[in-house]
Image (cartoon, rainbow, N blue to C red):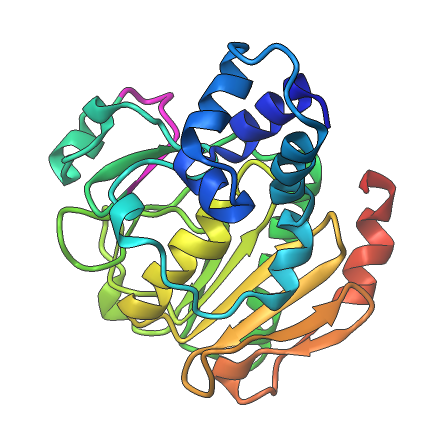
């Protein structure tokens, strides 16, 4: 990659210089000089090391486990789509509710994170997945309720975190209030794109597990993979493709999502 391409990827993924340094082994001071243009002719080896940080990003999704986020960086908005300004930190539910109607953000541990508008493939996956879940629940007279974004979820039952999962299921109806969902859903599905990769696969993965979400799916259109965590069984995921039939663990596998049927309907968008 060229310096310009690296800068574009850095903006796209929301990585800090410190995070890139940690992943590439290139000193922060060198990264600052290269990306600011102070070093007009950076070494080829330096550019290759920086490029690999972004080239490996998509392949890393298939091997994600419960990765601990660096403590020194977690309080800083370094994730994809993050609003990297101090004035977006130390926020509460009241700050969230005071945002303009057109603001699309999530509040996680007191920090606002900007959310990109969904793409057509994102919307279609969300709609079709929610429809299949609703069909199963309805045909079995189930008590669970499916939802799609935008719907506020007060994940930790405190005033520091409000998330908007793409698709989710709540089986305890006492968690459903007139304003929002109060507590952890049983199943959450997020549609992963380059703009939200770090946010959904690292930051929210950790939050969902710790909050008591039972099952978490990450659907990755770019690689046509589905990463499934069933936290009650293991901290490590199962990996599927867009041609598989995937069992929903919270219902003991009785509900099966036919991804081939979904893929056949939306592949023209890929």
In the displayed structure, 149 sits above or below 99; it is: below
Name the quadrant containing residue 50.
top right
- Residue 81 visible within the image: yes
Q: Residue 237 placed where, x, y %?
A: 56, 75
Q: Nearer the viewer, residue 27 or 20?
A: 27
Is 108 displayed left or right of 240 in the figure? left
Identify which residue is drawn at 22% across, 69% down: 174
Q: Nearer the viewer, residue 114 or 82?
A: 82
Image quarter where the C terminus lies is top right
Identify which residue is drawn at 42% across, 72% down: 144
- 103 drawn magenta: yes
Name the quadrant containing residue 97.
top left
Q: Nearer the viewer, residue 224 or 37?
A: 37
Q: Residue 49 placed where, x, y %?
A: 64, 40
In the displayed structure, 110 sits above or below 36; it is: below
Magenta range is 100-107
Name the quadrant containing residue 232.
bottom left
Image quarter where the N terminus lies is top right
Q: Residue 13 placed where, x, y %?
A: 53, 35
- 53 drawn magenta: no
Identify which residue is drawn at 69% across, 43% down: 55
Identify which residue is drawn at 20% across, 23% down: 87
Is 134 displayed left or right of 17 in the figure? right
Label the magenta part by its dominant secondary structure. Answer: loop
Q: Nearer the viewer, residue 56 or 84?
A: 56
Q: Residue 60 placed where, x, y %?
A: 62, 58
- Residue 162 visible within the image: no
């Amino acid at each position: 990659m060229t310096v310009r391409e690296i800068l574009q990827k850095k903006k796209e993924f929301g990585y800090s210089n410190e995070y890139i340094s940690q992943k590439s082994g290139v000193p922060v001071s060198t990264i600052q000089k290269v990306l600011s243009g102070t070093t007009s002719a950076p070494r080829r080896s330096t550019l290759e090391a920086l490029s690999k940080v972004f080239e490996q990003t998509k392949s890393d999704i298939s091997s994600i486990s419960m990765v601990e986020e660096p403590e020194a960086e977690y309080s800083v908005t370094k994730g994809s789509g993050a609003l990297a300004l101090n004035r977006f930190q130390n926020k509460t539910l009241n700050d969230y509710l005071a945002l303009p109607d057109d603001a699309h953000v999530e509040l996680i541990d007191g920090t606002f994170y900007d959310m990109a508008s969904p793409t057509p493939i994102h919307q279609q996956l969300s709609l079709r997945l929610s429809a299949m879940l609703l069909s199963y629940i309805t045909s079995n007279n189930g008590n669970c309720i499916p939802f799609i974004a935008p719907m506020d979820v007060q994940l930790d039952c405190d005033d520091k975190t409000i998330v908007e999962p793409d698709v989710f299921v709540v089986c305890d109806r006492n968690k459903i209030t007139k304003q929002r969902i109060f507590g952890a859903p049983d199943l959450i599905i997020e549609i992963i794109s380059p703009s939200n990769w770090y946010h959904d696969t690292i930051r929210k993965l950790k939050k969902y597990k710790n909050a008591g979400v039972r099952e978490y799916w990450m659907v990755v259109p770019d690689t046509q993979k589905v990463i499934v965590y069933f936290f009650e069984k293991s901290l490590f995921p199962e990996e599927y493709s867009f041609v598989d039939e995937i069992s929903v663990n919270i219902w003991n596998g009785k509900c099966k999502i036919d991804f081939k049927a979904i893929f056949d309907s939306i592949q023209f968008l890929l």
